[in-house]
């Protein structure tokens, strides 16, 4: 098989199975394939020349888009998950890879974006979360959980059974299946950071108990090295932020000026 023929086959498969767009350096669409237009319910005749809506969706916070464009302007590839609500009201999630391309003949950079639809995964995760909230939350029996995970979030070990699953059943599944879906990107970004930078990362999140009560958590991610200094796994320590939970409860009572009691200052 000739090299050109192989390239054509690869491009054909990419066109058929993925959503593809090409935009200019201002985010205006120059090309969008049929799969992209069909998935996003766009009229292909009206897409070209318009600003790429996924690059400015109101469903994402400014930091995400600032980070996206900062990465692209540095000439680096950006990877992440983008969300959009279609005109029909349907919500979709796309796993995106955006690549800056600059040829010798062109003064301006163009951006090749390849998307894969991960909406069903997101919905399955959300449905699983909603079903389990009714009976038992992930951390309602123990304020601290310790997970050992791969860089993709696969659970290698866990300190205690949770989410109505035994330790044996939890091993081999993914941490992303059990966290609040609103913090999917936060968890993924911090886990990636630890594996890439070989250092600790800490962040805050929250979950809801069976009564819909907000429970705050602090998560520490630390790298685990082999004898060659390569990060082979990470340890996730997730614990209830008791101090923050107490403060929230006090604020609900209508206390305008809060002074933390001394007995809680060490939490």
Image: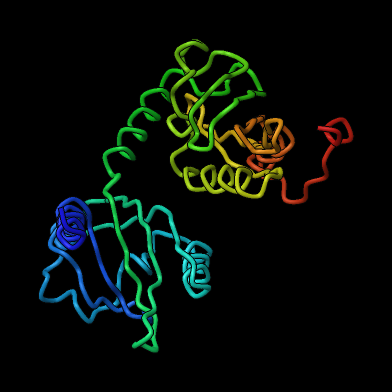
Q: Quadrant of residue 109?
A: bottom left
> As drawn, which residue projects farthest toward the right?
262
Task: Work out whether 2 lies above or below 111.
Answer: above
Q: Position of residue 82 (x, y in %)?
A: 37, 56
Q: Is residue 87 visible?
A: no
Identify the image quadrant of the C terminus: top right
Q: Position of residue 11 (x, y in %)?
A: 19, 59
Looking at the rendered structure, the number of numbered marks drawn on it comes to 0
Query: Looking at this view, is 38 or 255 the one in front?
Result: 38
* Left or right position of 232 against 111: right
Q: Is residue 133 visible?
A: yes
Residue plotted at (15% across, 65% down): 42
Task: Work out whether 57 lies above or below 222.
Answer: below
* Left or right position of 213 against 3: right
Q: Quadrant of residue 246?
A: top right
Q: Position of residue 146 (x, y in %)?
A: 64, 24
Q: Position of residue 165 (x, y in %)?
A: 46, 13
Residue plotted at (39% across, 52% down): 81
Q: How is the image coloured?
A: rainbow
Residue plotted at (71% across, 43% down): 200
Q: Quadrant of residue 144?
A: top right
Query: Looking at this view, is 5 or 14 the one in front?
Result: 5
Task: Work out whether 20 lies above or below 223.
Answer: below
């Amino acid at each position: 098989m000739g090299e050109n023929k192989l390239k054509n086959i690869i491009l054909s498969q990419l066109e058929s199975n993925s959503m593809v767009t090409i935009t200019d350096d201002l985010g205006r669409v120059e090309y969008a394939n049929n799969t992209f237009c069909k998935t996003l319910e766009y009229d292909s005749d009206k897409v070209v020349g318009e600003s790429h809506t996924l690059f400015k969706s109101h469903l994402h916070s400014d930091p995400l888009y600032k980070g996206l464009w900062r990465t692209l302007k540095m000439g680096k590839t950006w990877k992440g998950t983008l969300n959009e609500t279609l005109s029909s009201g349907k919500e979709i999630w796309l796993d995106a890879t955006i690549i800056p391309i600059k040829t010798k003949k062109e003064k301006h950079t163009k951006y090749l974006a390849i998307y894969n639809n991960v909406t069903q995964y997101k919905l399955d995760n959300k449905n699983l979360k909603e079903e389990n909230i009714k009976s038992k939350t992930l951390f309602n029996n123990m304020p601290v959980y310790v997970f050992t995970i791969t860089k993709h979030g696969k659970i290698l070990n866990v300190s205690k059974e949770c989410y109505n699953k035994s330790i044996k059943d939890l091993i081999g599944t993914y941490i992303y299946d059990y966290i609040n879906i609103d913090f999917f990107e936060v968890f993924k970004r911090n886990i990636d950071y630890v594996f890439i930078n070989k250092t600790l990362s800490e962040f805050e999140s929250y979950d809801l108990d069976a009564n819909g009560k907000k429970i705050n958590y602090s998560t520490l991610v630390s790298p685990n090295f082999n004898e060659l200094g390569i990060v082979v796994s990470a340890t996730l320590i997730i614990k209830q932020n008791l101090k923050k939970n107490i403060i929230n409860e006090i604020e609900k009572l209508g206390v305008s000026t809060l002074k933390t009691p001394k007995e809680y200052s060490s939490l």
